[in-house]
Amino acid sequence: MMNSPIIAAHSVTKTYQAGEIEVHALNGVDLAIEKGQMVAVMGPSGSGKTTLLNIFSGIDDATSGQVIIDGVSIHGMSDGDRTTYRALNMGFVFQSYNLLPVLTGAENVELPLLLAGKSASSSRKKALEVLDMVEVGDQANKRPSEMSGGQQQRITIARALVNDPAIVWADEPTGALDSETGGLIMDLLCKLNEEREQTFVLVTHDQTVGSRAERLIFMRDGKIESDEVRSKASLIN
Ligand SMILES: Nc1ncnc2c1ncn2[C@@H]1O[C@H](COP(=O)(O)OP(=O)(O)O)[C@@H](O)[C@H]1O
Ligand SMILES: [Mg+2]
């Protein structure tokens, strides 16, 4: 028997009102993602990838339907509970790094822990461990403006992982990087997925990123057009 999925979506729709026009960004999405899966969501621009990520992660509300994370309906929670739930259980990696420019690498990474009420010393210790894990320990005392794009994206990944989230959501994680650096970031995400059994949902329009994922979901016009699961063994070259 299969384990119950960590992410389950039932008939999810999202309609945006753009002036007089309704945009059906999600048009009835059903999806179940197992714990530890590395999933890539691909599809043309405007097909609903970012909307799917924002709604499945509870950043935004669905128009109708349900999203169940680890057995809990996230849209049934109050805004405050949902924010806390996200802070404790989810990590986010976006294309534009969203690092705070006045803070150092270590300060950016420890921030989620401080906000969650952890002590300054334990937060710094954990931040330095995670920076080492993603191979930017030497950037701990630099500000983002003193780092390369790849280093900044690693800092963003460290910040997403510092609370040991069950699910990591990434929207175009390699979008601002050259292809070689993007490949190294994918090596890192695949390694983390393998070693830590975290679930990754990556939105990307990059074919090489999609080809590295265990499961490839293709969206078109707010619907899942295809959904292909490959064995992990077939991805190792
Ligand atoms: N805040 C918004 N208001 C109105 N329309 C939106 C909004 N966000 C996205 N859309 C529309 O919803 C559709 C899906 O967008 P999006 O999820 O960003 O697609 P993708 O990430 O695949 O490029 C597009 O037609 C887009 O223009
Ligand atoms: Mg998008």
Image: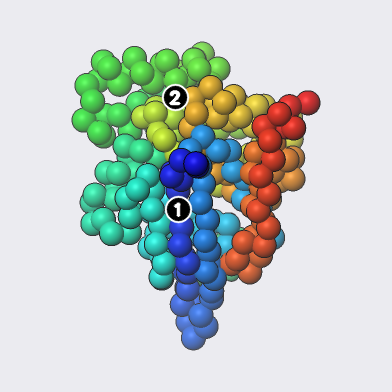
* Position of residue 127 measured from the top left corner of the image (x, y, whole percent): 38, 20
Asked if 126 appears above or below 158 in the picture, the reply is above
**Amino acid tagged 1:** Ala
Q: Closer to the N terminus: mark 1 or mark 2?
A: 1
How many numbered badges does the structure rendering display?
A: 2
Question: Is residue 78 rendered to the left or right of residue 71?
Answer: left
SS label for mark 2: helix
Evaluate whether residue 169 shows in this view.
Answer: no
Dot 2 crowding, Cα within 10 Å, few <14, some 14–19, many 20+: many
Q: Residue at x 26, y 34 (%)?
A: 115
Marker disc for residue 105: 2
* Position of residue 49 measured from the top left corner of the image (x, y, whole percent): 58, 57
Q: What residue would you read off at disc 1? A: 8
Question: Is residue 137 rendered to the left or right of residue 41?
Answer: left
Asked if 128 appears above or below 216 in the picture, the reply is above
* Position of residue 144 measured from the top left corner of the image (x, y, whole percent): 50, 29
SS label for mark 1: strand
Which is more foreground, mark 1 or mark 2? 1
Q: Are marks 1 and 2 in contact (CB under 8 Å)?
A: no
Dot 1 crowding, Cα within 10 Å, few <14, some 14–19, many 20+: many
Q: Nearer the viewer, residue 210 or 16?
A: 210
Q: Residue at x 43, y 44 (%)?
A: 4
**Amino acid tagged 2:** Gly
Indicate the quadrant where residue 63 lies: bottom left
Q: Residue at x 34, y 44 (%)?
A: 86
Question: Is residue 54 rendered to the left or right of residue 203?
Answer: left
